[in-house]
Image (cartoon, rainbow, N blue to C red):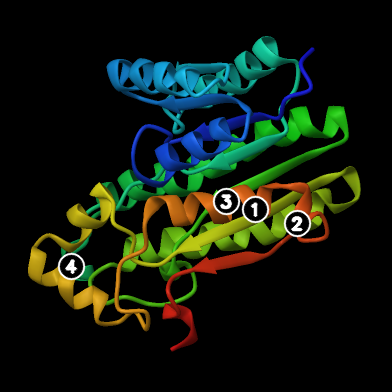
Amino acid sequence: MSDKQVVLITGGLTGIGRASAIAFATLGANVVVAGRRDAAGKTLAEELRSLGAEAEFVNTDVRREDDVRALVDRTVELFGRLDVAVNNAGTEGRPSPITDQTAQTYADTFDTNVLGVILSMKHEVRVMQAQGSGSIVNISSTYGHEGAAGAAVYVASKHAVEGITKSVALEVAGSGIRVNAVAPGPTDTGMLTRFTGTPENKAALVTEVPMRRLGLPKELADAIVYIASERASYITGHILNVDGGHSAN
């Protein structure tokens, strides 16, 4: 079994997930990326291998427990263990006033953002408890601890992620597993473009950031790498804001 760190990233094909995969691979980790698009996944795995990493793509829908179980088991089958899990798979849902929301828009958002995290953690913890070590990083948002008009369902889902993070951190604190979350502020990704809808809306969001710019996916990836690492060995149950000062307002 290799002594290289083994990292699993859900929602790993674009944005913060992709940047994180590249960051871990650059540091020499073995990386498994999960997503739902085969061509993009295989291309990313090849890119990670070109950086010197052993890498694999596994087609996974985090809303389906059988998929998640198979993803975690495949990671262990390939590399013998699971050191770091980054639960990044998420959706912006359909931002709109509460009067436009339906049971279906709720389910579409919560099944990925909340159920997906719960199922992922269930099986990641299963493996990490058996090996007596591991680090889990969930991806929240500044909206995980703030409100946003017109985005109540998305905001609720990210509040849930932060509550789940703290609760599971307490459950497993004595078993060698750390559980934290990184909460990005406005970050220059395709999801942000979809979420804001127009260039004007995106520009308006920037004005709410004290540093007066969007975050870069690599900046979020660097924070994820840090809090997942042994350099953060006494940190668990923490929400790390990486938001240009947004949460300090």
Residue 202 numbered tag:
4
Q: Position of residue 150 (x, y in %)?
A: 22, 71
Q: What separation in Å lies between label 1 and label 2 (alpha carbons)?
A: 7 Å
Amino acid type at circle 2 is: Ala
Farthest bottom residue in view: 249
Residue at image location 70% in from the left, 51% down from the top: 179
Asked which secondary structure carries label 2, the reply is: helix
Crowd rating for badge 4 (residues with CA inside 10 Å; few <14, some 14–19, many 20+): some
Residue at the spot of label 3 = 224
Query: In the rendered image, which quarter is residue 45 located in?
Result: top left
Q: What separation in Å lies between label 1 and label 4 (alpha carbons)?
A: 28 Å
Residue at the spot of label 1 = 226
Amino acid type at circle 1 is: Tyr
Numbered disc total: 4
- Of labels 2 and 4, earlier in sequence is 4
Query: In the rendered image, which quarter is residue 7 located in?
Result: top right
- Of labels 1 and 2, earlier in sequence is 1
Q: What separation in Å lies between label 3 and label 1 (alpha carbons)?
A: 5 Å
Circles 3, 1 touching at the beta carbon (< 8 Å): yes
Q: What separation in Å lies between label 4 and label 3 (alpha carbons)?
A: 24 Å
- Give above or below for 43 relative to 189: above
Circles 1, 2 touching at the beta carbon (< 8 Å): yes
